[in-house]
Amino acid sequence: MDTEQFCYTKNNFEISNTPTFVKDSSKDLKHIKKQIKDNVKHLKKAQSKMFARHEYSILIVLQGMDASGKDSMIKHILSGVSPSGCNVVSFKQPTEEEKLHDYMWRVNRKLPPRGHIGVFNRSYYEDVVVTRVHPQIILNDYLPNIHSLSDINEEFFENRYTNIRNYENYLTQNGYVILKFFLHISKAEQKRRFLARIDTPRKNWKLSASDIKERQYWNKYQAVYQKAINATATKENPWYVIPSDDKWYSRLIVSNILTKRVNKMPLAYPTLTAMQKKDLVLAKQFLEDEDKY
């Protein structure tokens, strides 16, 4: 699979011209599931090496409209990876404590430690997506010189885009491998999934009144996602726009991209020093002889 077709590194993303579905994507579902399973096994081995050295971390950023498949994506592409080295964070509406700090404060607190894989199910990008659709939210963030909606202008968001680019560059320099995925679904597919949640009792809990309310802002969300992706896609930290009307195919694409990126990382188990090897020999001798004492 050529995953580069989903990669954006500069200001050339047009959301209306980007497909949400790939023809015949799940023609061989059995093969797709096997490939994902193989990728997970590979990732599990890589994560073990990463955890042993504590030099690099992987940060997976998942963004997308409601019902785009973020939760199930995490479940399927990371199943089998050691829970001790993997953590998932979902960023909801900021708490009062979080609003009393800069908007990246809560993000820094949830970054995966070195040697870990972290997933942000929604992320700091909400601060240039949801807040562009509903700028009145920002009026409650105690920001200096922000007193009315007229103060939340294009310059305000351009500054935030710059903040995000610099922040991601900073993380990259400190050993974080950042993979940003936008799960791109059509409005018709979102409707189908919402109806399925209503018609299936065990899925009722997944749908809230706010989900339906936000759907009326569909076009605005499409526009702000296009702006955010174009403004923050760089060669070092590109965006991957994943056609997600077909859940299994979207999982395969993300799984393949993650596997390819991990393969480029200089991962290996730590090499012991001569002294450490000597200590192991002594430890082995002690364990073998302990019954003699």
Image (tube, rainbow, N blue to C red):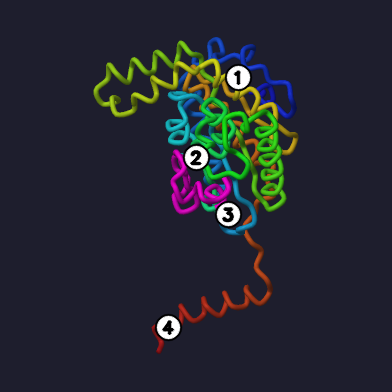
In contact (CB < 8 Å): disc 3 and disc 4: no
Q: Answer whether labels 3 and 1 touch (C-beta < 8 Å).
A: no
Q: Which mark is residue 223?
A: 1
Disc sitting over residue 140 in the figure: 2
Tell me which label, 1 or 4, sits earlier in the chain. Answer: 1
Viewer-side residue, 30 vs 83: 83
Residue beneath label 4, please? 290
Q: Which of the two labelled residues, at mark 2 and mark 3, occupies the earlier sequence position?
A: 3
> Which of the two marks, 2 or 3, is nearer to us in this view?
2
Kind of residue indicated by mark 2:
Asn
In the picture of the structure, the residue carrying the numbered disc 3 is 115
Residue 99, given in percent of the width and then of the height, sits at 50, 46
Q: Which of pointers 1 and 4 indicates the residue nearer the eye?
A: 1
Q: Which mark is residue 132?
A: none
Three-letter amino acid code of the residue under disc 3? Gly
Classed neighbour count for the residue bearing mark 4: other residues with Cα under 10 Å, few (<14), some (14–19), many (≥20): few
48 in magenta: no
Neighbour tally class for label 1: few under 14, some 14-19, many 20 plus, Cα within 10 Å: some
Sooner in the amino-acid sequence: mark 2 or mark 4 = 2
Measure how far apart labels 3 and 4 are at the Cα level.
35 Å
Q: Please tell me whether mark 4 sits on a helix, a strand or a loop.
A: helix
Q: Position of residue 231 (x, y in %)?
A: 70, 30
